[in-house]
Image (cartoon, rainbow, N blue to C red):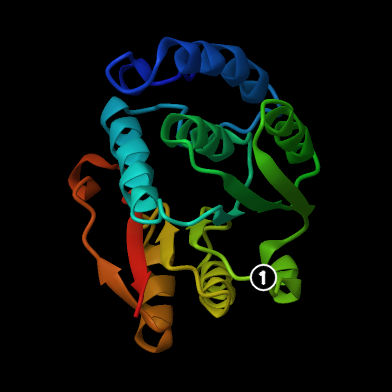
Amino acid sequence: AYEIYQCDWSSDVCSSDLSELFQEVFPQLSIVHDSPEGNTLEIVDEQTAYAQINFHTFNLLELIDKQPIRVLEIGTNKGMFGLFLLWFQKQFQVPIQLVTIDPYPKSLKAVEILQKYGLNCKFVEGPSQLVLGYLSDLFDYAWVDGHHGTENAFQDLQHCSRLKPTILAIDDTNYPEIEAAIKLWLPESGYSASHSPWLELDQRKAQVFKLL
């Protein structure tokens, strides 16, 4: 019983053809599998949806000069972050290349849908702690939204920082386990914490870190 957060896709933010794109793609992604978790564009709380959409937009606009912006995602789920990237690509006329990782094969369907609508994305199936060890390409932006256990999240952060994204963002820091993983990782990471203007509105407390 989630719905797309309409306010952020109004004509004030994007053109009517992009709004129509969302109305077409969103229902296809929402039934990819039956995960009960909310995603970037699926809302349990309107303020959180507003905060997270603006959080990603603000971060990616710092990378707007990249051609393309190379994005790494941990936790494909239903592909809603990919749908956000599809919107960003079309709204700001900047190409995106996405590599997205998930242990559940059903998430491949989400990637196939996004590819059909023009997002350059690659799906890698498997536990992120294993898959990330095989990646060697560098990225501009990383979005960590995977396993919520401290050890798993710590390994995700360690692997991501090895790939040196300019901006590294992580979701769900409202979980004590995620906060503990960040405290273990940050001192030797080569990253510094950056304040998010939307942190107070975001129930999931997405945080952002920048490469030193």
* Residue 15 picture location, percent across and down: 40, 16
- Residue under label 1, please give it: 137
Of residues 203 and 7, the one nearer the viewer is: 7
Q: Secondary structure at mark 1?
A: loop
Q: Residue at x 21, y 60 (%)?
A: 195
Mark 1: few/some/many CA within 10 Å (<14, 14-19, 20+)? few
Of residues 87 and 147, the one nearer the viewer is: 87
Above-or-below relation of 122 to 142:
above
Q: Residue at x 37, y 16 (%)?
A: 6
Residue 37 makes an appearance in the image:
no
Q: Residue at x 25, y 65 (%)?
A: 194
Above-or-below relation of 160 to 78:
below
* Residue 45 picture location, percent across and down: 32, 28
Of residues 132 and 99, the one nearer the viewer is: 99
Residue 155, image quadrant: bottom right
Above-or-below relation of 86 to 68:
above
The three-letter code of the residue at mark 1 reads Asp
| Image quadrant where one finds the C terminus | bottom left
* Residue 142 picture location, percent across and down: 51, 60
The reply, left or right, for residue 124 in relation to residue 28 is right
State the count of labels: 1
The reply, left or right, for residue 53 in relation to residue 165 is left
* Residue 200 picture location, percent across and down: 18, 46
Residue 208, image quadrant: bottom left
Above-or-below relation of 35 to 166:
above
Residue 156 makes an appearance in the image:
yes
